Amino acid sequence: MSRFTEDLARYRARGVTGVNLLLHPAVWAIASYRLSHWVYVDRPMALVRIPLKLVALLTQKFCVVFMEMDIDAQATIGGGFYIGHIGGVHINPGAVLGRNCDLAHRVTIGASAMGRAGIPVLGDEVYIGTGATLVGKIRVGDGAKIAANTLVMSNVPAGATVMGVPGRIIMRARAATPVAAAASDTDKLEVPVGSQDGR
């Protein structure tokens, strides 16, 4: 449940603390997803898993029926997940979201209805605006921004901003300056062989 701790840290960083944090419906939806994912995907020992399946089922149905928040337990979502407002969020099984992703309400991340197999894979620190829909076998790069009411059906490069129906790139990530690029190369040389970035 360390990822849920990261989720709560994102809310606290935005000023949602104390009772407001405990009563925040989006936090309830994320907690329900984390519990369901742990029970059905991580599969703790049977003595714990079996009674918690009922709890996970009830919390999941509560979120779907009363809050319109359907985050499937089979989705993979990194820590630091932030949902600004409840309502209309649907994340399909198989979807992958990286760390520190932000979602507004009325967001759909799922399969295409046009016969295209596959589910979106999102990188770290991706922002998805209100009413946006991401469908099909696509990849959204780190730090990308999806504007409100945008339909994304093709890959989005890292750092790009996409808007429209269908979504089009309206802004790309700024290229690194020579000094920054050199510093980045130096940093890479200093990483010990065999180390990992922790993602």
Image (spheres, rainbow, N blue to C red):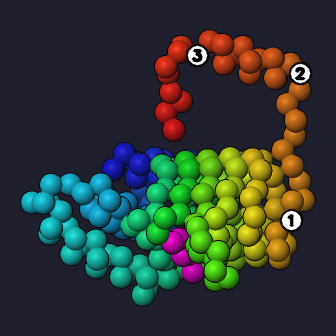
Residue 23 versus residue 119: which sits nearer the camera?
A: 119
Image location (x, y in percent) of residue 64: 43, 82
Image location (x, y in percent) of residue 190: 62, 12
Relative to 171, 21 lies left or right: left
Q: Amino acid at mark 3?
A: Val
Callout 1 secondary element: strand
**Which of the two discs, 2 and 1, labels the residue nearer the N terminus?**
1
**Which of the two discs, 2 and 3, labels the residue nearer the N terminus?**
2
Report the disc number at residue 191: 3
Callout 3 secondary element: loop
Residues at marks 2 and 3, CA–CA distance in whole angstroms: 20 Å
Q: Is residue 119 above or below residue 116?
A: above
When asked about the image quadrant of residue 72, the answer is: bottom left
- Range of residues picked out in magenta: 88-92
Report the disc number at residue 182: none
Residues at marks 3 and 1, CA–CA distance in whole angstroms: 37 Å
Tell me the chief SS of the magenta region. strand
> Mark 2 = which residue?
178
